[in-house]
Image (cartoon, coloured by chain):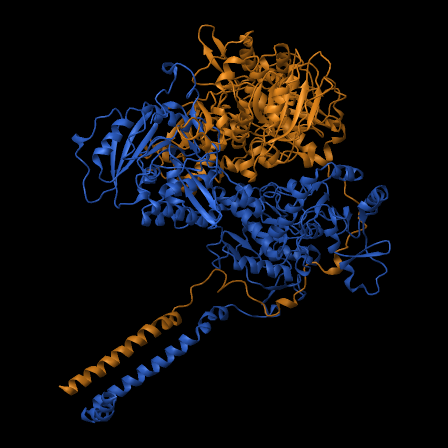
Chain colours: A orange, B blue
Amino acid sequence: MQSWRRRKSLWLALSASWLLLVLLGGFSLLRLALPPRPRPGASQGWPRWLDAELLQSFSQAGELPEDAASPPQAPHGGSCNWGACFDTSKCRGDGLKVFVYPASGPISETHHRILASIEGSRFHTFSPAGACLLLLLSLDAQTGECSSMPLQWNRGRNHLVLRLHPAPCPKTFQLGQAMVAEASPTVDSFRPGFDVALPFLPEAHPLRGGAPGQLQQHSPQPGIALLALEEERGGWRTADTGSSACPWDAHCEQDPGSRQTQRRETLPNATFCLISGHRPEAASRFLQALQAGCIPVLLSPRWELPFSEVIDWTKAAIVADERLPLQVLAALQEMSPARVLALRQQTQFLWDAYFSSVEKVIHTTLEVIQDRIFGTSAHPSLLWNSPPGALLALSTFSISPQDFPFYHLQQGSRPEGRFSALIWVGPPGQPPLKLIQAVAGSQHCAQILVLWSNERPLPSSWPETAMPLTVIDGHRKVSDRFFPYSTIRTDAILSLDAHSSLSTSEVDFAFVVWQSFPERMVGFLTSSHFWDEAHGGWGYTAERTNEFSMVLTTAAFYHRYYHTLFTHSLPKVLRTLADEAPTCVDVLMNFLVAAVTKLPPIKVPYSKQRQEAAPLASGGPGPRPKPQAPAPDCVNQIAAAFGHMPLLSSRLRLDPVLFKDPVSVQRKKYRSLEKP
Amino acid sequence: MCASVKYNIRGPALIPRMKTKHRIYYITLFSIVLLGLIATGMFQFWPHSIESSNDWNVEKRSVRDVPVVRLPANSPIPERGDLSCRMHTCFDVYRCGFNPKNKIKVYIYALKKYVDDFGVPVSNTISREYNELLTAISDSDYYTDDINRACLFVPSIDVLNQNTLRIKETAQVLAQLSRWDRGTNHLLFNMLPGGPPDYNTALDVPRDRALLAGGGFSTWTYRQGYDVSIPVYSPLSAEVDLPEKGPGPRRHFLISSQVGLHPEYREDLEALQVKHGESVLVLDKCTNLSEGVLSIRKRCHKHQVFDYPQVLQEATFCVVLRGARLGQAILSDVLQAGCVPVVIADSYILPFSEVLDWKRASVVVPEEKMSDVYSILQSIPQRQIEEMQRQARWFWEAYFQSIKAIALATLQIINDRIYPYAAISYEEWNDPPAVKWGSVSNPLFLPLIPPQSQGFTAIVLTYDRVESLFRVITEVSKVPSLSKLLVVWNNQNKNPPEDSLWPKIRVPLKVVRTAENKLSNRFFPYDEIETEAVLAIDDDIIMLTSDELQFGYEVWREFPDRLVGYPGRLHLWDHEMNKWKYESEWTNEVSMVLTGAAFYHKYFNYLYTYKMPGDIKNWVDAHMNCEDIAMNFLVANVTGKAVIKVTPRKKFKCPECTAIDGLSLDQTHMVERSECINKFASVFGTMPLKVVEHRADPVLYKDDFPEKLKSFPNIGSL
């Protein structure tokens, strides 16, 4: 019995030791037996030379000051680049001035639109001598005629030859040093940084405005087809990618089971649009996909993407190798929702910013060339590639993104904590003493500017305030109130009329709201536009309704950048219109901001009593001595000039958090807003 | 004690009693075990010997010992090089095959020494830099030692400097590489191309279709989208430690420190110096130094001696002029000094210009404008100059600093071309880390007001309060824009009521049963959600009117990238406790809305479920609390925007609401909520919540206006 027990304990000790051995030794043995897992580069990689330290440098010290004697090289013949073939000295005065050669003979509709959009731009000049860029339209295929050498040709120096359709004319003259702006040029003939790649403009492309993007929502609808494929005769069909291994391969299409053909669409309705093929078809498909918000997947395009010099196409399209269809398909299927979301939105932004009308395409072309001339003060990439786009973010205003109202998020910056009050004093010309007091009482106010715009002489004395007060003698024009005065030193402007009546706490609250929405207008009084069936046009109402689309600029906060935009980017026609019909100026400013932001303005509360007793100014709601609704035509004229109706309606008002809540007034920060 | 003694005594007696056969057996067994234990112990205590066995495999040999290969004089020479090459014509992408990681594989040929028929070497075996470069590739994720899996081949023959090469023979060496195949998918690195007298801007070695990573390309030799333009490495990068100097004005405005400039250029520069005095400094080689040993590290102006490259830190702008070659190593020194390079070299392709935005870090001036350089630079605003100085230093740190940085950037560029859908973005290449950290890229950046017709999907999370749930369903179904109702049944122990018992409503009603009772089930991106707008609503929120919900949806349409909710909350910094505090009192500010009743974009469900930082999601599920605070953090962090609180305050059935009403002061609840805020702020590494002072009301809310004409009359009644 005892021996059995002893033997048992012995066995126990033995097996325990064995277990220990197996446990401890097993791993080590395993590590010994199996070769160590080859870490990349570690096991079989490039050898570590024992004498690596003794190796000589690739550039011996004596060699660096090599080549003093050789002369600077002249550019090789035949090819041009920006530095060698463009003379920027002619552009020094007023920047880019463009002269366009008049057409000889009949011209096509597209050609006509191009001419119109150049002539309507701020770059245009009628004198070839004063121009820094001379533009020659190479005629399109329909008229069949080719241009002859123009007078001021000068070996093509500072010339831009605009070709809408890929090389319709045989070389009737040597291009010399001229740049070529061509619709989807081949990569082989394209000279980066010198030529400009244009999009392929369809026949019916509108002059301005243009069709908006088709995207209705940010993310793709559930169940939407993954891929749309091009069809002959300009249609699209969606492909069922689940069953077919190579949905775009001609061989697969023989097999009826491998694909599903949906109804043909003029614009694709899918997440991705596959574009192979050759120009110009592919180029026109590309534009359709952009408009539809369908992410273009380009298979080895042999043509340069439009405005590739400034547009970062990797944010809106996928360029893939046509030889790896399966990989591309797999990559599309596995693409993260975040990337799909970003790509989709970018297609829409780019379409709206640069491609939707002939005017935008032409202005973008000129802007690209102006950026080259400006060199270091050109648009940074961010301005080109995020909303609202470089055509609406003028580089003459600033090239620091944080100076604009649009890029605070990307820059991690915040809008400034101060504002400037700009008080417009029109006829009859009473100094707005009470208003100045109210505004000066705001803790956020940095300065007050009085824009004296009437026939009476400037008053000699102004009220005593701690606030710096500047008086500007205006030109008696209504559009003056939106001039970018250099004396305005803050980002935020509170635009006011001499008649306006505001309390300090209204001003304070509105400004705090503006800081959350620096790109929008924040106003107290509103008006709306509506479609008037009876007259077949737009109508305007200042009645109090459940929604609004405009705020009156007689009392509104907005970013000072809109002054620059108003003065320098609006067509002169529109500013003249505003001067002639002063009540239009509000509408025009609202149109401008809405066209840039694609968002409605913001309304903040305004004391009811004053709202009824003393209307703010022209266009104000409620009963007033002299109803001054803007000429009904005003909205329609402006809409026609914009080419579309940018105004959007909002149904909300932003109030202080405790506004009219049943709590003690003492708890409320903006209590005077609630006084009856 | 007793037992052991007894054992000791009885012990020996045990063995003799066994049979001898057994004794031997046991002894052998014991000694094996003992030996094994000793051996194991030795291995355990010398773990490093095993680790270092990796190093044993890496050959440590001398460069002089590499095999010698004799090259016949008549061996073939590759074609000169095809200027029309593009990735889709000259690059064999099939070799890159399918790779789930979207990474190309690079093979490096073994080092050999090539001699001609007379035994004269074709080139120096390998330079220090090229050895570093190949080591860097070999250590990277790109490397493969399997020639059959490789997509890119890098010859070990060193062509960094054309001057050290015998051109024809080097070409012959290339042609006899085992996978040469007209140079397809071969990558050559060259930093000093051309030779006297005319200095070509690309390597003169005939190389057929091989890609060239070259320093000093001009527009005429550079094959856009095929070649890669790389910097000329400056050995000073490694030798000299220039600490980063903050941006701002410096002693000299413009400096020229190159030696051996063409006399014409030097005249132009000296003219500038005469005109602008102190602010322009033109340096040259020192002629009067006692020993010429360190002449590379000295520069002189008249009799003043300056240390190079330290002197570059004294200038705002530094001239980088072309020599006979376009690419100059000084560019690297200039960037290192945080000086903004003024590049005067017509047609020069700046390094990595395919991905780097040089406008942000340099000024390019045409050669014929050299005399205007000063006025061009003066027109740049100070703020932009400082931005450029920072950017210049960042470019050096990221892409110029070492041979390794140059090699990896080159491979990344080629990788991005082959897998464009996985390419690195402009911001990742160009934004310095400080900017990347501070910036927010809103995933819903496009200003877009979704059409009203889309409607919203209401998601009700419920456990077992069926009666209350049915009331919520009936109330919510009255909202005109509701398009679907989704009930998330979070109770695994009980079946949802039968179909016939549910309220009959005009929109589809779906019940989703969950596998586990988790709070995060409320934020799961269910396939059933077909609309972009989601209304999350608790099964006890019965006090919201149809007008209030409809108005909330209208507000969401104007702010589709935000959380739009009814009860608002605030976070505050508690100065006494030095941490965040949760606040549900009547405050003038809000920074959060409760998701017991809130509209938001369904994309945030995806983010909550799959992209929530750290362990927050599991933490919330484990604590059964704060899922709403987590959602507020997530949305604010990703969009950089504040929430929108809609409509006035009213009584809500939620723990804190009752707390304020004074019914039961649930202090622990508030403490828990505060803990959540502190926990999330530490996981996010920042406090993303934004505080605002506004809420959204209907335009005519509480205005003196006929109620029946208001769109949303039934709002704000308690």
Q: Residue at the location (68% across, 61% down)?
A: B239
Specify the farthest residue to the left. Answer: A1
As rendered, which of B274 and A534 lies closer to the eye? A534
Estimate the x, y position of residue B275 in percent, counting from the top left.
Answer: 85, 41
As rendered, which of B632 and A191 lies closer to the eye? B632
Relative to B460, is B675 above or below? Answer: below
Residue B78 seen by the camera: no
Q: Residue at the location (56% across, 37% down)?
A: A414
Q: Which quarter of the rendering shows the N terminus of chain A?
A: bottom left
The answer to which image quadrant residue B636 occupies is: top left
Indicate left or right for B279 with A501 as reference.
right
Estimate the x, y position of residue B499 in percent, counting from the top left.
Answer: 18, 32
Indicate left or right for B370 with A364 as reference.
right
Figure disc tally: 0
Estimate the x, y position of residue A183 in percent, counting from the top left.
Answer: 58, 27
Relative to B631, is B140 above or below? Answer: below
Estimate the x, y position of residue B156 in percent, counting from the top left.
Answer: 58, 59
Residue A423 seen by the camera: yes
The answer to which image quadrant residue A254 occupies is: top left
The answer to which image quadrant residue A131 occupies is: top right
